[in-house]
Image (cartoon, coloured by chain):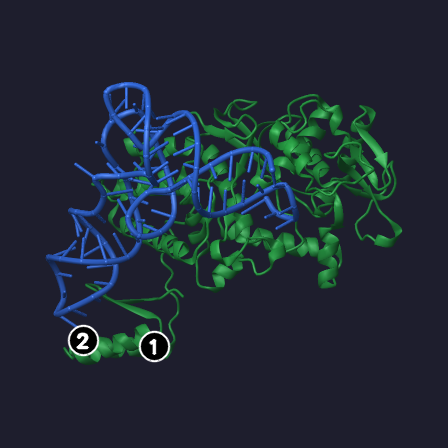
Chain colours: A green, B blue
RNA sequence: GGUGCGGUGGCCAAGUGGUAAGGCGAGAGUCUGCAAAACUCUUAUUCGUGGGUUCGAUUCCCACCCGCACCUCCA
């Protein structure tokens, strides 16, 4: 089945044609590890994971590369301000290296909790300084680089199609808008740093020797160097958040294509932002952002958030709300309960890849990742008249992409002894047909967050979320 | 200022040139001592507003209103 992806470069859905049949190489921009990742950041990784898993389901061999930006990402994308890593180090009184290590680990903890598959290659920028310097040397040799006071810059006027990703009118609009602080020494407003020099007053913790002097790589250079190192001069798919279109990815294209003379990436796939509605803007600098850890503390399964991400298309803005997350959590619970029941009923899962439902499911995924429609197909099958074997087979197959741990047994948490005693007492009261007492006890338990269910097999309970 | 996106039932959200997926919620029923859970059924003659094209538009075109995002720390 053909996969269609919306390509930011051409502004239309295109059939994915890999460079090598059956193989798909992806470069996905990773986190800048100077602070915790919030759930808005994670939306992008969840969407990328959906793409990776869809490619695998469709039979591709996937090689996914993710960078870790642990140096060089300045407070402003316009090559001004401090390095975020150094800011984090100052804030917490640790070394920049410790900051990077700590937040990298924290990121992958959340990443894993959301059932995102580990990248095949994870590359911290600080381990690829030589590759960046080498790329810079090529750019210099080809005449795209020039030196000014604070660093080596890329001359965007030398590249006729500079800015093609964001679009010509957009790039011109930025110039007119003049909202980007301009370094007066730059030849053109859009020129960006390839290498920045350390200054004595900075006392940088992260700096390296280079043919141009001591300093550190430009943020955009990092991704170009690492992407080409691991995936070749031209890569299949490059992903990231929508915010990267006009600066970061635009500049990656500029550097890479200037250096190689070949297209950098064939498909550019960007995810829209999660917005916070009345909670305020979802940004690190705004403070008080929500993390996966926050959700866990509030009693949510992180996979409820994954479901929530899949409830809307990745190219549509998604507004976060607790109500919506509750709905997603309920849905995940319900799906797991259905699968648990099917596992009791079915002898073995049965999957018919020619069934209309399965085709609908895969076609939805193949149509620019319509997870919302894919989800609807799953619900449809589970509520259809199909056999338990077929339903189970379908659900387990769907979960290869959805990754909601649908076959996870509902966790029976430990109950405090005094609450367990109340349940025992209530069961005795029910047996004695003392329903008044029984109802009192049920109320008492529910006030403590324990919900009672009397089933033919006996009384069960679960903890209310909150 | 530039660029782009959206406005579909109480909420979230797919979708299509021929008359509206799915989930949540709500209502009814079965079950239950009563509930809960589960299951069954019901819940948009209508898709921001006004025009136009068409045999026919929610879907195409134009105008307008409203909301949002990115370009500025962001994924």
- Image spot of residue A64 (x, y percent): 57, 36
Is residue A230 something one can see in this rendering? no
- The residue to which callout 2 is attached is A430
Check disc 1: other Cα within 10 Å, few if <14, some if 14-19, many if 20+: some
Is residue A429 something one can see in this rendering? yes
Q: Chain of mark 2?
A: A
* Residue A438 position by quadrant: bottom left
Q: Which labelled disc corresponds to residue A320?
A: none
Q: Are marks 1 and 2 on the same chain?
A: yes
- Image spot of residue A379 (x, y percent): 30, 44
**Residue at horizontal 87 percent and vertical 40 percent from the top:** A149
Q: Which labelled disc corresponds to residue A419?
A: 1
Asked whether A433 or A436 is in front, the reply is A436
Asked whether A197 or A301 is in front, the reply is A197
**Numbered-mark total:** 2
**Residue at horizontal 36 percent and vertical 58 percent from the top:** A410
Asked whether B40 or A121 is in front, the reply is B40
Of the two numbered discs 1 and 2 on the same chain, state the one appearing first in sequence. Answer: 1
Which SS class for mark 2?
helix
């Amino acid at each position: 089945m053909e996969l269609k992806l919306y390509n930011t470069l051409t502004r239309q859905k295109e059939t994915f044609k890999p460079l090598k049949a059956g193989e798909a190489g992806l470069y996905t921009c990773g986190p800048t590890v100077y602070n915790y990742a919030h759930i808005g950041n994670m939306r992008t990784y969840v969407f990328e994971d959906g793409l990776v898993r869809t490619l695998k389901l469709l039979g591709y061999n996937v090689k996914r590369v993710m960078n870790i930006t642990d140096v060089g990402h300045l407070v402003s994308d316009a090559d001004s301000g401090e390095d975020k890593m150094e800011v984090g180090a100052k804030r917490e009184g640790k070394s920049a290296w410790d900051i990077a290590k700590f937040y990298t680990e924290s990121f992958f903890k959340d990443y894993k909790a959301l059932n995102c598959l580990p990248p095949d290659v994870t590359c911290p920028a600080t381990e690829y300084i030589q590759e960046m310097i080498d790329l810079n040397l090529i750019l210099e040799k080809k005449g795209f680089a020039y030196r000014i006071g604070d660093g080596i810059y890329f001359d965007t006027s030398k590249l006729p199609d500079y800015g093609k990703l964001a679009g010509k009118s957009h790039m011109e609009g930025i110039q007119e808008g003049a909202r980007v602080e301009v370094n007066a020494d730059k030849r053109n407003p859009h020129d960006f740093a390839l290498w920045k020099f350390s200054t004595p007053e900075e006392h940088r913790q992260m700096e390296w020797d280079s043919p141009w002097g001591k300093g550190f790589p430009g943020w955009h250079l990092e991704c170009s160097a690492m992407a080409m190192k691991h995936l070749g001069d031209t890569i299949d798919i490059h992903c990231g958040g929508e915010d990267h279109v006009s600066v970061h990815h635009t500049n990656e294209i500029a550097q890479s294509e200037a250096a190689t003379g070949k297209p950098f990436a064939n498909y550019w796939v960007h995810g829209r932002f999660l917005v916070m509605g009345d909670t305020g803007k979802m940004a690190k600098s705004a403070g008080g952002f929500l993390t996966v850890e926050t959700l866990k503390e509030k009693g949510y399964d992180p996979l409820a958030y994954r479901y929530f991400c899949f409830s809307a298309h990745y190219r549509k803005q998604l507004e976060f709300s607790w109500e919506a997350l509750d709905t997603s959590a309920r849905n995940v619970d319900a799906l797991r309960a259905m699968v648990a029941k099917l596992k009791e009923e079915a002898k073995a899962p049965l999957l018919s890849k020619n069934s209309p439902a399965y085709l609908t499911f895969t076609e939805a995924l193949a149509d620019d990742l319509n997870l919302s429609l894919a989800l609807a197909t799953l619900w449809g099958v589970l509520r259809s008249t199909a056999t338990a074997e077929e339903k189970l087979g379908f659900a387990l197959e769907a979960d290869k992409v959805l990754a909601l741990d649908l076959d996870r047994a509902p966790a029976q948490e430990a109950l405090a002894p005094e609450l367990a005693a109340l349940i025992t007492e209530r069961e005795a009261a029910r047996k004695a047909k003392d329903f008044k007492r029984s109802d009192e006890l049920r109320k008492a338990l529910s006030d403590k967050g324990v919900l009672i269910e009397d089933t033919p097999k006996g009384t069960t309970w679960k903890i209310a979320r909150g």
